[in-house]
Amino acid sequence: MSKSICKAVKIIRCLSENPAGRGVTEVAKETGFGKSSVHEMLSTLCEEGVLCQDPRSRRYALSAHFLWLGYDVACMLRPDRAVLTELAAMRGELGMSTGMWIAQKDLAVCVAASLVSSDDDLLSGTGRHDKLWTTAAGQVLLTSFEGEELEKLLPEDAGERGRIMTLIDQTRRRGYGSDRGEIRSGTCSVAVPVYNKFGRLKAALSVRGPMAYFAGGAPEKFARRLVRASAVAMEHIDG
């Protein structure tokens, strides 16, 4: 990647973390670039419509262009209607919130959900994201990584890495992942993989509810229901 592209990316990231905007001096200080080169890059990005500048404060901020980019990405990730229908059907049958998740770097990101109540939105709604190793869906998604690629996604603590590797191996053996209270005390989740027509793991389907619902052989029963839904999703997932 060229130096100018790296510089532009770093400046854009700086502004994305400061929605109120930043002046040339602030951007230079936070990125470590010289003021003259920062000013030149900010001006270029403004000319291209990527950034905008407040005429009063002279601060720079991300333009509405990024909103449209985000909308386009959301549309690409949004599952087919058949998958959304299946998520809603499972919610109705099981009385628990359901979701579809994908891996983005070291995060599990929810791209679709059917929630029991609006209170579940912060827990498992669309756009929710958590470290891969903290959720059942994330454990499932991690099974698609191996070697150095997997190592890069795990925390640095050796003990924690060992625990997570054990969970990944367990998930591979039994065909589903599970968590108990990692995201919210008193809740559990079960998740299964979704493969595309080429056998590549592309997403995970999950169900989450009160811990009392997961007693005995319930996790296996939920996993079997999720596998049926996964078969539907596989017919409507690209790439």
Image: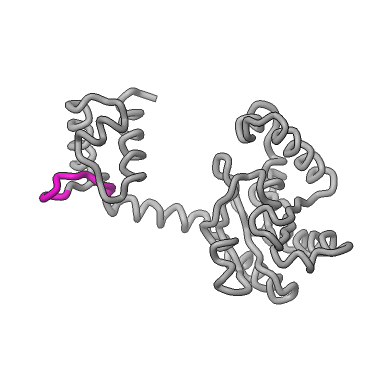
175 and 23: which one is in front? Answer: 23
Q: Residue furthest right?
A: 216
Asked if residue 239 shows in the view, the reply is: no
What residue appears at the point 21 percent right and 47 percent down from the top-left corner? 52
Give the magenta-colored segment's residue range: 54-62
Q: Residue at x 78, y 64 (%)?
A: 225
- The residue sitting at 72% across, 45% down in the picture is 199
Colour theme? one colour
Point out residue 32 in the picture as x, y percentages from the top left corner: 30, 26
**Image vertical order of residue 71 relative to residue 40, above or below:** below
Q: Position of residue 33 (x, y in %)?
A: 27, 26
Residue 20 in percent (x, y) is at 27, 50
Residue 60 lies left or right of residue 19; in this view the side is left
Identify the residue shown where x is 63% and y is 73%. Answer: 116
Residue 61 falls inside the magenta stretch: yes
The quarter of the image holding the N terminus is top left
